Amino acid sequence: MTLAIFDLDNTLIAGDSDYTWGRFLAGIGVVDGNFHERENQRFYDEYKAGTLDIHEFLSFSLRPLSQHSMETLHGWRDEFMEQKILPLMLPKARELLKKHRDQGDTLIIITATNRFITEPIAQAFDVEHLIATEPEILDNSFTGEIIDVPCYREGKVKLMQRWTSFNGGNLNESWFYSDSHNDIPLLEVVEHPVAVDPDETLAQYARDKGWPVISLRDTDA
């Protein structure tokens, strides 16, 4: 079984779903706008710089989930998908997914963003398998904590290896598409690493390694 693995944020979609969710919550008045916007931007800048404390960020980003009912959260998420995410879904991403699907590959989205936000995005892309940071749920409510390791940097490798041990496939025969230098640990262990609209650090790393670099945004690509 050949795996075609895809990062989500800034790879299949033209933006970051976690960051956009935070801005959405601020926009509808669910969180303190000035504080949340400032912290949200700080964490996003740290992510891009490779200095993010993932546990500090998750404590921040999951807190709003723990403060509202599941019914309310799902209503907001439906609005978020319609207003913010669908416009970010890249046509060329759909084409790439279709190419691998037609080849008989098993498609997987793997993302540091939590499952509550990303599950409907994976469904909208018609990708059955999603590996994401897992927020804890007790009595049908989010606790603000996570289950297991964050799906981030080396954590992505650990969770991907665990997935293959239960479901089959071999990372040595797989593809992985990502935009971020934070995904270099997973890019290093697949046979076909591909940099997609990469950040500056990953672009240089890919050039040094001789990895393919593609764009899902450039109309001439």
Image (cartoon, grey):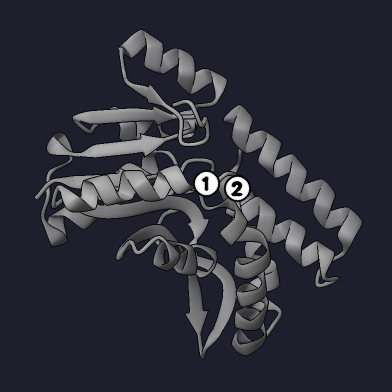
Farthest-out residue, right: 34
- From the viewer's perspective, is 210 left or right of 56? left
Mark 1 → mark 2, Cα distance in angstroms = 5 Å
Q: Is residue 156 left or right of residue 63?
A: left
Tell which of 78 and 117 is nearer to you. 78
Q: Residue at x 49, y 32 (%)?
A: 180
Judge by depth and name the residue closer to the eye, 84 or 20.
84
Q: In the image, residue 163 lies at what x, y percent? A: 22, 56
Label of residue 9 in the image = 1
Q: Which residue is at the far top?
A: 208
Q: Residue at x 13, y 46 (%)?
A: 2
Q: Is residue 135 visible?
A: yes
Name the secondary structure under disc 2.
Answer: loop
Query: Dot 1: what SS?
Result: loop
Report crowding for label 2: few under 14, some 14 to 19, many 20 or more residues within 10 A (C-alpha): some
Q: Tell me the residue that label 2 is attached to.
A: 16
Does 177 appear above or below 114? above
How far from the left and from the top, in percent, is residue 170? 12, 44
What is the three-letter code of the residue carrying label 2?
A: Asp
Residue at 68% across, 54% down: 20
Residue at the location (19% across, 47% down)? 3
Q: Is residue 98 above or below residue 72?
A: above
Label 1: how many residues lie within 10 Å, few (<14), some (14-19) or many (20+)?
many
- Say which quadrant the C terminus sits in: top left
Residues at marks 1 and 2 touching, judged by CB atoms closer than 8 Å = yes
